[in-house]
Amino acid sequence: QKEVEQNSGPLSVPEGAIASLNCTYSDRGSQSFFWYRQYSGKSPELIMFIYSNGDKEDGRFTAQLNKASQYVSLLIRDSQPSDSATYLCAVNFNNNDMRFGAGTRLTVKP
Amino acid sequence: GAGVSQSPSNKVTEKGKDVELRCDPISGHTALYWYRQSLGQGLEFLIYFQGNSAPDKSGLPSDRFSAERTGGSVSTLTIQRTQQEDSAVYLCASSSYYGQGIYEQYFGPGTRLTVT
């Protein structure tokens, strides 16, 4: 079974705070993990991906991966109102077979 | 370069009619995916094509749904005898190989289907 689980939220943080988004997946053999952002009425857009255990930083975004725990997270530092969106976790189970979580809705309040 | 394109952008149809949704992937992308997203919901996987391999149809919700990919490029998703619960945004994505076993997926703008 190919499952990707996310807390649907909504998650609300004040402007300038750190937003933490979490995701778990079912297949221990999964190799690559993705975070997408989706604004209301728009298509998902890729924020970043990670494939090695540990942290990967890109600007205000940090992805964290723990393969032993089958857990991946996204931290958004200095959150801005423009970060308000639904964040989708995606897992490449094998051979380019990508599955998505249900998404976490984030609201950043000014 | 050109991204993933989908047509039509909006489709309103009467219950019981058949509809065809089209996806033009990014040139050179070997993998193509169809997803469905109902209002306020996550992405529901429908079908996945990878090169010349048999497609993974495990997400198609019923036998009224079918998809094909011609010449390894353009794909058409067909819904027969549409029902009101088929109303959703249908998203297509194609993927490129980044390296190290990683494929980056790019989405089209979607087709909003409304069944009346």
Image (cartoon, rainbow, N blue to C red):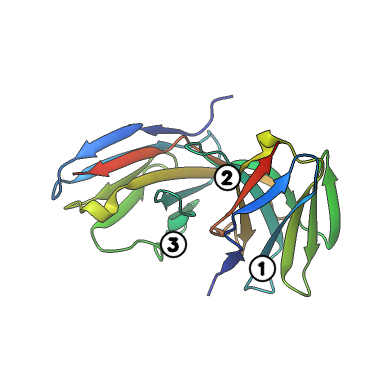
Q: Which numbered disc, 3 or 2, marks the residue that appears first in the sequence?
A: 3
| Above or below: residue A101 compared with residue A40 | below
Subunit of mark 1? A
**Residue drawn at (62%, 73%) of the image:** A26
Instruction: Give the distance between the C-alpha atoms of the residues marked 2 and 1, in whole angstroms.
Output: 23 Å
Cα distance, mark 1 to mark 3? 23 Å
Tag 3–tag 2 contact (CB < 8 Å): no
Badge 1 marks a residue whose secondary structure is: strand
- Residue A24's mark? 1
Q: Which residue is mark 2?
A: B95
Residue position for label 3: B56
Q: Position of residue A80 (x, y in %)?
A: 73, 36
Q: Amino acid at mark 3?
A: Asp
Q: Which residue: 77% across, 70% down?
A: A67
Locate the N terminus of chain B by quadrant: top right
Label 3 element class:
loop
